[in-house]
């Protein structure tokens, strides 16, 4: 399996080796370390600095450019401004040439005629900017339709969007095992395997037995490291 990223932290003896379709689980039972892990990853996945080192083939990579993190499964939103801007950028790129440009020119002609008629009775001169693809998409309030009925559907939609729009190669979720049952988790793992993306889950407690798909690192209260499902290594 192709390497996506190898993640190191000074408290972890075992590096997290994310590969296509693999699931890694980091359980930090010590509350202070759990907070430090999540805070560092949240900062780094949003362009800041933290204690984790992300490498590929021994060379540093930018986690904010290649990954995405969801710290709160209750409040993440596909219609976040940054994601919608990525969507508009992608749609605009698809409309640069060909028939779309011809249709835009025709639309600008119709808009010009409409404004000329609207402005004709004003006792002063008015001007306006012609529509661009970007301004048209923003004016139309393009956004993701909220068709999901379950958290699993929302997460899969989010993953699909970030893979398509940002080219994400891995995803980090905090507290996911507390809100998805094992059946939903295995459906999610299967989807990520098909998409060839890596998955990294952070939890503050072992809520259920480790699933066969998960490589787990458990950090106890006194910072001992326990591994699960590493027989093949």
Image (cartoon, rainbow, N blue to C red):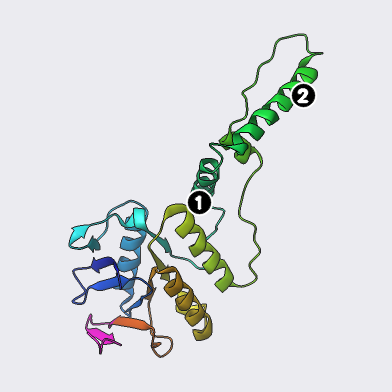
Horizontal and vertical percent for residue 47? 33, 51
Horizontal and vertical percent for residue 170? 38, 65
Which residue position holds label 1? 83
Residue 49 falls in image quadrant: bottom left
Residue 198 falls in image quadrant: bottom left
Q: Mark 1, mark 2: which one is toward the viewer?
A: 2
Say whether residue 183 is left or right of residue 55: right
Q: Which residues are magenta?
A: 218-233
Q: Can you name the residue that lies furthest to the front here?
A: 98
Q: Quadrant where the N terminus lies?
A: bottom left
Indicate whether 44 appears above or below 35.
above
Q: Main secondary structure of the magenta part?
A: loop
Q: As rendered, which of 171 and 57 lies closer to the eye? A: 57
Indicate whether 28 appears above or below 50.
below
Horizontal and vertical percent for residue 4? 30, 65
- Residue 39 visible (yes or no): yes
Tell me, for residue 46, which label it has, or none: none
Q: Secondary structure at mark 2?
A: helix
Which residue position holds label 2? 114
Say whether residue 233 is left or right of residue 154: left
Q: Which residue is found at the position 48% from the left and 80% from the top? A: 185
- Residue 175 visible (yes or no): no
Q: Can you name the residue that lies furthest to the right here?
A: 121
Residue 44 falls in image quadrant: bottom left
Q: Quadrant where the C terminus lies?
A: bottom left
Horizontal and vertical percent for residue 169? 38, 62
Q: Which residue is found at the position 32% from the left and 82% from the top? A: 216
Q: Secondary structure at mark 1?
A: helix
Q: As rendered, which of 150 and 75 lies closer to the eye? A: 150
Q: Which residue is found at the position 43% from the left and 86% from the top? A: 207
The count of marks equals: 2
């Amino acid at each position: 399996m192709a390497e996506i990223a190898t993640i190191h932290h000074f408290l972890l003896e075992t590096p997290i080796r994310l590969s296509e379709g693999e699931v890694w689980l980091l359980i930090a039972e010590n509350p202070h370390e759990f907070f430090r892990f999540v805070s560092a990853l949240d900062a780094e996945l949003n362009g800041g600095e933290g204690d984790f080192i992300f490498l590929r083939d021994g060379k540093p990579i930018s986690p904010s450019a290649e990954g995405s993190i969801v710290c709160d499964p209750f409040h993440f939103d596909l219609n976040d401004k940054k994601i919608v801007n990525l969507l508009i950028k992608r749609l605009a790129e698809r409309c640069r040439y060909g028939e779309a440009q011809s249709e835009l020119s025709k639309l600008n002609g119709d808009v010009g005629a409409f404004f000329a008629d609207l402005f004709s009775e004003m006792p002063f001169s008015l001007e306006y900017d012609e529509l661009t693809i970007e301004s048209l998409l923003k004016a139309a309030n393009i956004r993701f339709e909220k068709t999901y009925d379950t958290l699993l559907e929302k997460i899969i939609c989010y993953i699909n969007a970030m893979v398509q729009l940002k080219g994400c190669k891995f995803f980090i979720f905090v507290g996911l095992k507390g809100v998805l049952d094992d059946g939903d988790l295995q459906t999610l793992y299967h989807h990520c395997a098909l998409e060839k993306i890596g998955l990294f889950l952070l939890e503050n407690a072992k809520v259920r037995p480790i699933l066969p798909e998960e490589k787990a690192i458990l950090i106890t209260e006194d910072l001992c490291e326990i591994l699960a499902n590493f027989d093949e290594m």
